[in-house]
Image: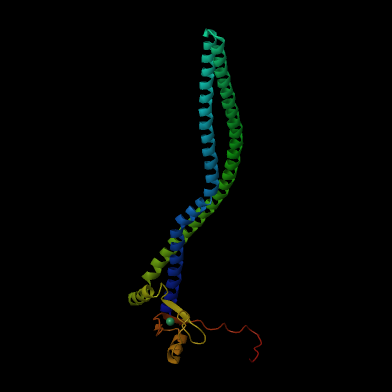
Amino acid sequence: MSPDLDRLIGLQQLDSTIDEARRRVAAYPERLAEADLRLTGAKELVEAAKARLKDNNEARRALEKDAAMYQARVSKFKDQQSAVKTNKEYQAVQHETETAQRDVSAAEEKVLERMMEADGIAAEIKQAEGVLAAQEKEIGAVKADLAKELAAEQEKLAKASQQRESLLASLNPRLLSLFEQVSRVRKGIAICSATRDGLCSVCHVRLRPQVFQQVRQNDGIVQCDSCQRILYYVPPPAPAEGAVTHPA
Ligand SMILES: [Zn+2]
């Protein structure tokens, strides 16, 4: 194989490695966000339970205020009872007192209900927080793996870029410019092999016999008539020493 073809194949491998590593590095933030997104459900459960506890507390405080107000009414009527003159007035105030006392009891009972409900919600919060913590731990491990992967890709990228630089220094500028021109218009693949039955391995167009013959020599720059990619040929492996070949 001609040294030029060898270098171009090497350049293509480095370009593909660089391309792939860049794509992976660029995809990293989205993969991190996806990992975080997996916590959304568990976070929402914790937040919903906390919101319910807050509502519960507010409702309880309102009921406590009601209870205090009814209690004040009871005291007021009790004061009035000692000042009434007639039996009829006494009975009226007595009736008001009893009503107010019933209101106090009803409000206090509702306060108790709210407090019991709050205990249940607090247990739910604790349980949801436990689930969230377990998931956070799991996602933390996923993110640590992602960070390791990113570091490895960045290292691969740096190494390949460096190798590419030194390869370019040994490459004929006209060849490089041809390579880059084809690479630009052909999705980053400027050089590819011809198949053993004479097709371009990327665009799959059949090469003219004389072109295929030239490609098989591997000693010059031959381009695919159809996609313009530079072609090389990988000969079939030589049969192993002592291997028996059977006619087809
Ligand atoms: Zn082709």
Question: Picture coordinates of residue 198 (x, y %)?
Answer: 49, 87
Query: Is residue 244 positioned above or below 178 on the image?
Result: below
- Please indicate, yes or no, whether residue 164 appears anywhere in the rendered image: yes
Residue at point 57%, 28% (across, down) = 111
Depth check: 229 or 162 in front? 229
Residue at point 61%, 41% (across, down) = 127
Report the coloring of the rendering: rainbow
Residue at point 41%, 64% (across, down) = 161
Question: Picture coordinates of residue 112 (x, y %)?
Answer: 60, 28
- Please indicate, yes or no, whether residue 39 appears anywhere in the rendered image: no
- Say which quarter of the image contains residue 247: bottom right
Question: Picture coordinates of residue 3 (x, y %)?
Answer: 43, 78
Quadrant assignment for the C terminus: bottom right
- Say which quarter of the image contains residue 228: bottom left
Query: Is residue 191 positioned above or below 136 on the image?
Result: below
Depth check: 38 or 198 in front? 38
What count of labels does the image hold?
0
Residue at point 49%, 58% (across, down) = 152
108 left or right, relative to 211: right
Query: Is residue 21 positioned above or below 73 on the image?
Result: below
Image-quarter location of ligand 1: bottom left
Depth check: 130 or 241 in front? 130
Question: Picture coordinates of residue 213 (x, y %)?
Answer: 45, 89
Query: Is residue 189 positioned above or below 141 on the image?
Result: below
Depth check: 22 or 56 in front? 56
